[in-house]
Image: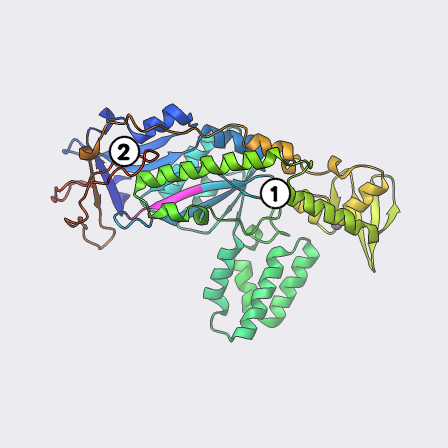
Amino acid sequence: MVGQRSYYQFSIRRFQNKLSYVELVQRTCITVKPGIDFVSRSGSGDTTFQRFFICFQASAYGFEVGCRPMLFLDETHIKEHRVQGVILAVSALNGNNELFNVAYSITDSETYDNWVWFLENLKKALLSDRRMAFLLDRGKGLKEAVPDIFPIDHHGYRFQHIMQNFNDQCVGKYAAPFKKLLRKILQRIAYAVTEQEYQDAMMAMELNYADAKEWVLQNDVDHWSHARFLGQRFGELLAESFNNWIHDARSLPILQMVDKIRVQMMEMAAKRKIDAALWDTPYCPKVQKIIEKNLQERRSLAICHSDGIKFEVIKSMKTYAVDLHLQTCSCGHWQLVKIPCKHACAAIGSNNEAVSQYDSAFYSTEVYKAAYERNIQPIPTFDMPDPASTIRCFHQATDNKKVAWKTEKEENTFKRRSRSCVYLFKVQTNRSQPKNL
Ligand SMILES: [Zn+2]
């Protein structure tokens, strides 16, 4: 493991004697799993920071009681010029389809080992072992790490990533109009809800470009087409990215960045809690709109009863089969997103029942509020000792690159800028190359 480290390390002398940020977080935010990895450098007496994982108790609890069992895994590069590392993050969606961060991590690079470490920590932090669906990019090591750590859970791929690969590997050489057509067909394959829609889209792909159909079959279509995905991901193919949400924080030094993300999470949760207190609908606003639209559109549908549980719903020349007991519609959308489609709403209405009896509780205002019931606490830093001289930071070479020590100009102590942030790093002037890294 030591030999595989790359990009950056922090040598933290006498770290254990200092009040660390991790300890502060543990004390004040009651983290479920504050994980931090150090490795010893033989002969130097130093410990070296390798990676950091944090999941606040409020987040683990909020995910458990207030979010669907679906997680998005993200990776992004740190933009602070002194450090080359990555942020790994896992997020969910709350009942209003907004991003809900569950945990995040700072590490040196995106590798299989780091993802395994991250996912093992996540597994310990989650409050139950309910069946999960993961949505991810096919990044370095991630594709392999998820099934290794969560072998019985389902994992699907983000459609943006699939489309990018399709452009790069399959249709990039063709003229724009043809490329556009193939992209549209690929989109049809991804968003096909029923097997028939999937087969029709695959046929269209084959007729236009047989090699593209082969590309689809060879690129894990079972993990990104709705019609083929076996898990429950509530119709999500394009998750909002945690990386976009923390965009500004990525340019900060590491501990400031970690703390800035915590503050962003804390403020976001507080704002949502206040907003939700004013909602007077049984469902979160975005879902309430969908339900109201479906209720409106059901008026144009004709209904044929079968036995009080099964119905035929007729729209123009098409007929849809609804089963209230199984909560399915042959259009596929009810079982996909767990919100009754317009056909289901028509059947429910003709049975004189309320749609609320058939919606997923995860979309309710009550469950939304539960997601933010517990708070991420403020962290006071005014009494922190100044450990600035105890930490040495350097870039290490990866592969064929030489070790890149900092210039004199870069070797400045980071200053305290506000009481809300934590500053631990001082770059030392020792330019000798460490051994045994
Ligand atoms: Zn339907």
Judging from the image, what secondary structure is the residue with disc 2 in? strand
Residue 286 location, x and y as percent?
64, 45
Q: Quick check: is the Cβ at mark 2 less than 8 Å away from ligand 1? A: no
Q: Is residue 102 visible?
A: no
Residue drawn at x 23%, y 41% is: 414
Q: Residues within 10 Å of mark 2 (few under 14, many from 20)?
A: some
Name the kind of residue labelled 2 in the image. Answer: Phe
* Quarter assignment of residue 391: top left
Residues 209 and 18: in front is 18
Residue drawn at x 83%, y 39% is: 309
Name the kind of residue labelled 1 in the image. Answer: Gln
Judging from the image, what secondary structure is the residue with disc 1 in? loop
Task: Locate the N terminus and report the quarter of the image it occupies.
Answer: top left
Residue that mark 2 sits on: 38
**Does 24 appear above or below 170?**
above
Marks 2 and 1, how far apart at CA: 37 Å
Residue 271 location, x and y as percent?
52, 37
Which of the two discs, 2 and 1, labels the residue nearer the N terminus? 2
Residue drawn at x 65%, y 65% is: 203
- The residue segment tinted magenta is 84-89
